[in-house]
Image (cartoon, grey):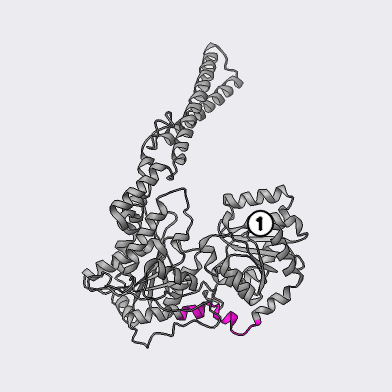
Amino acid sequence: MDLNAAAGRQRSRGRIVMLVDNGVNGDSRVQKVARSAAEAGWEVTLLGRSPHGGAQTWRLGPAEVRLLPMPDPLARRRHEFRRAWLRWPLAYPPSGIAAHRAQWVKAWQTDIRQREAELTLAAGAGLVGRRLEQRRRRLRIERKAAHLLRRWVSLRYWMLTRARKGRKLTSPWDRLYTWFWSTVQGGRAWRRLEPGLWDYELAFGPVVDALAPDLIHAHDFRMIGVGARAKVRAAVAGREVKLVWDAHEFLPGVQPWQDNARWLPAHRAHEREYVPYADAAITVSASLAELLRREHGLVELPAVVLNAPDVTGGSDADAEPAPELRARCGIGPEVPLLVYSGAAAARRGLGTMIEALPQLPGVHVALVVNKPDGPYVRELLSRAATLGLTSRVHVLSYVEHWQVVPFLAGADVGVIPIHHWPNHEIALITKFFEYAHARLPLVVSDVRTMAETVRSTGQGEVFRAEDVDDYIRAVRAVLADRERYRAAYDRPGLLAGWTWRAQAEILTGVYRRLLADPDGPAADTGPPRGAVGPVVPGSASVDPAGRPAAGAAAR
């Protein structure tokens, strides 16, 4: 081992490895957790999944970020390797030959055009005769043959594409398959239903072992298995590793990203198998903490670490200041501006904002989204064009997480038009706190927790989700008296509790308790002023072999 590195580790509180199943960029919670832990004195390595297949590394303040390449062959289903003879008899086999044939035909047609151009030059140079005419006739025949072959290849390629996309894992057979393996293997059934979860283990597991952490912080439901198995291996090797599970969402309330009857039962089984190995759990809201306690039979509530923004300028000292929102939109200060910041998806309700614009003369909308060029955003812009509103809709990309609050402050109203969905009902989402620190009056749909909070604080108006007319009413009310709604933020202690600094104290308190930090006792993990509910740290113990102790994490 490098002596300097060893000395550095001795001076640190210990080594923490954090695991996340994305590319880190765009995930402000993960970034803030890693940076806060590193600034508090721990040696932090954040492992994420490379979106481009190549390893990447950079610094996030004192924390190191490493994105790992993750091949995912196990994520492909067996039917994807077979031909769909009955439904698509002419489809190419899923072996890669389709792309080869399509490219070969294109090359042939390119060659024909090249030879035709050469004959044209020859004729222009005065070269005529029987041989030239024969070559022209031969090229005409080749051109027709190539055209017919391309249509044939296109047909077979199209059938292959349809065969790949057409199979949805919701058929009676798929439901029977799910029931069978769930019955035969019980909680271990995810190994059959969602074997792609092993791809995470094979990519991340060896790296975690090599880093030899004192504590593993596993973000969300995919990484809890990677962290738990690493904990067991470390125990076998004679090392004690603590495991923190950070539940961002309530898994039973997650909408699967594809039509797949196996997805939710598999991931729930995977989560249930490995949550008992966690020494502590944290989550994003008091409501979700209670749901997790009931779902997994936890003895104690998970600690609540809100998705609050970092308003202390947690960027590097030489980082660029936040850009101007109105400048990016190309509008002046007198133009009413509504802003939405977050992921772009139909269930986020952005269509409501577009449909309402004809009834809101002069009002502009800024959509600060993760995929400005994505299909859903293109659909929104197409609808805006149909309504003749293109000039009043501005699509912008994300800014750095420490720039978000001053960036959003350029708007007049912050909008959260999300639809009713289980996970939307139980938490104050990140953008809620970002809007609040930007001192924006809010217009939010009537999802439970946000609606209750807004009605309680008076910081905005609530409308019925997906109801365009009621949304228009709410926007008009807020625009008519913006300062009254902004005054809600003057309540003593409200914004102070909605800061990342307050949440970081809870997070590091959990770490100190688990690692028996010699620098002092664990911080008080009670709720900061302005928190939305009780905060009690979760706990689970394991025996020396890394197995959950009876009655620790689960009843």
Above or below 360: residue 484 = below
Mark 1 lies on a secondary structure that is helix
Most distant residue in the top direction:
130
> 95 left or right of 331?
left
Residue picked out by circle 1: 352
Above or below 378: residue 129 = above
> 48 left or right of 341?
left
Residue 440: tell me if it is visible. no
* Amino acid identity at mark 1: Thr
- Closer to us: 356 or 455: 455
The answer to whether residue 373 is magenta is no
Q: Position of residue 9 (x, y in %)?
A: 32, 78
In the image, which residues are magenta? 490-505
Q: Position of residue 269 (x, y in %)?
A: 35, 58
The answer to whether residue 504 is magenta is yes
- State which quadrant residue 398 falls in: bottom right
Q: Position of residue 87 (x, y in %)?
A: 43, 32
Residue 254: tell me if it is visible. yes
- Residue at figure coordinates x 69%, y 60% from the top left: 365
Most distant residue in the bottom direction:
520
- Closer to us: 139 or 337: 337
- State which quadrant residue 399 falls in: bottom right
Task: Give the tally of numbered discs.
Answer: 1
> 110 left or right of 443?
left
- Closer to us: 408 or 4: 408
Mark 1 crowd level (few <14, some 14–19, many ≥20, 10 Å Cα): some
- Residue at figure coordinates x 40%, y 34% from the top left: 84
Q: Position of residue 188 (x, y in %)?
A: 30, 56
The C terminus appears in which quarter of the rendering?
Answer: bottom left
- Residue at figure coordinates x 45%, y 71% from the top left: 290
- Closer to us: 423 or 7: 423
The N terminus appears in which quarter of the rendering?
Answer: bottom left
